[in-house]
Amino acid sequence: MESTFSSPAEAALQREAGVPGLRTPLADLDRVYELERVVGFVRDLGCQRVALQFPDQLLGDAGAVAARLEETAGSKMFILGDTAYGSCCVDVLGAEQAGAQALVHFGPACLSPPARPLPVAFVLGQRSVALELCAKAFEAQNPDPTAPVVLLSEPACAHALALATLLRPQYQDLLVSSPAFPLPVESLSPEPELLERFGRRFPLAPGRRLEEYAAFYVGGSEASTDLDIDPDLSRLLLGWAPGRPFSSCCPDTGKTQDECARAGRLRARRRYLVERAKDARVVGLLAGTLGVARHQEALAHLRNLTQAAGKRSYVLALGRPTPTKLANFPEVDVFVLLACPLGTLAPQSSGSFFQPVLSPCELEAACNPAWPPPGLAPHLTHYADLLPGSPFHVPLPPPESELWDIPDVSLITGELRPPAAWKSSNDPGCSTLTPRPQLDLVEISPAASFLSSRSWQGLEPRLGQTPVTEAVSGRRGIAIAYEDEGSS
């Protein structure tokens, strides 16, 4: 009977947690992990305790890298793995718990500024790039040498930006982006002419705009689909100007692909999610980061946004969102993941979630009536762009504004949406408790309405209606095999 309804206990002990990544040969550790640069970083700061953060696929090399750095730098190294949220974010909380004075982040990174000041060095990796093949692909994709083009790359191919040295003699209006590493607190701000977007810096000339340029992206793979698209490429496709060409190039083979059609599908998916957010009555705000700057301010902004739109919001701290975790909240209509730019876009392509997972920008477009209409508003993947102080911030209109009374029809259900009941937090009329004739109190909320519509609402107390009886001996055993059931 045990093998029919459950797995034996030994299976849980023998099950592997995950497939470890391939280990790097010891002779290649210095080159792959740039240990010479890391040692210089540690020695310049004079740190005695340094945290090393690895993603899951690189944990197999963590021990060898830490031992090599301790031997060379003479400092104590601590390995950080299994982060609570995304491995692309700097785990400043884990570093503080280890008493580290600096942190070295290995692998793909979102380059988001940390919530607390801490010296950080990034080792993005060096994926092999066929420069000659990529140069020929660039020339075939951009036959006009006077057309403005931006050269982009995935984080592991940042060294492929040296491709510009092969193209600059021919292309006069070639713009090369660079990774936007977070600047130390005591350092000066970057030059004002460097535009920072999509985790990159663009040295635009005075009077030029990024919307004028086409894009050539070095990264990805030939077999990538809409479901397994890299989040870094996804945020570029969503945020790039719709009317400008965008092509990607596989760094291994030099094969190019026009990404305009895929960008259109991603934008259509975003418009659908905005409609779902407009129809939603209950919104689940998922805390997807604790180490990125201004996350508490962004959470307060989203709560105020949902309240102004007449929606009920719940804050959920569940770590990394999975379909199993979110299925425990069936009364929630949509979820909004408050995370770094890469972490926000990671679960959107998955179709296994019971309810859609949105980004903060999509909730802003659904709840703020002053937000520009589709086609005119930019798609912002970082929640900091929605907060006050950002050039993209759009404040909520006052309660007496006519924007709240504009009729709106749902494109999903075809019904007319009711106007938002805009109420401030100090309004005495927004109480959620209503007295019953029996002087009982009941909470009027979408969650309570959802509970009342369910066929099974839990055990009923039935106080005073059940006769009192003496305690009797119950069944003995476990649910899979009680003693009175026999061995069959």
Image (cartoon, helix red, strand yellow):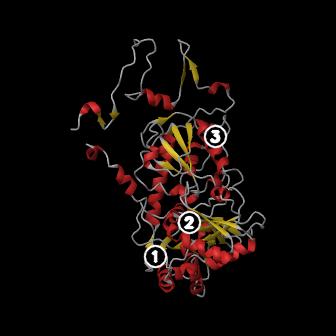
Q: Is residue 92 left or right of residue 56?
A: right
Which amino acid lies under the numbered mark 2 shown in the image of this protein? Phe
What kind of residue is marked 3?
A: Asn
| Neighbour tally class for label 1: few under 14, some 14-19, many 20 plus, Cα within 10 Å | many
Q: Whole-percent x and y of residue 302?
A: 61, 44
Quarter occupied by the N terminus: top left
Q: How many numbered marks appear?
A: 3
Label 1: which residue?
A: 250
Q: In the rendered structure, which disc, 3 or 1, sits on the residue that comes first in sequence?
A: 1
Distance of label 2 from label 3 (alpha carbons) = 36 Å
Q: Secondary structure at mark 3?
A: helix
Q: Is residue 319 left or right of residue 9?
A: right
Residue placed most toward the observer, 264 or 70:
70
CA gap between label 3 and label 1 equals 43 Å
Reading the chain from its start, which is encountered first: label 2 or label 3? 2
Which secondary structure, mark 2?
loop
Viewer can see residue 196: yes
Contact check, label 2 and label 3, Cβ < 8 Å: no
Q: Residue at x 50, y 31 (%)?
A: 446
Position of 323 compared to 70: left or right? left
Say left or right for 474 vs 317: left
Quadrant location, the C terminus: top left
Q: Earlier in the sequence, mark 1 or mark 2?
A: 2
Q: Which numbered dot is residue 304?
A: 3
Residue 54 — which label? 2
Residue 153 appears in the rendering: no
As helix, strand or loop, the secondary structure at mark 1 comes to loop
- Residue beneath the point at 40% across and 11% down: 467
Say above or below: 284 vs 38: above
**Mark 1 and mark 2: Cα distance apart in space:** 25 Å
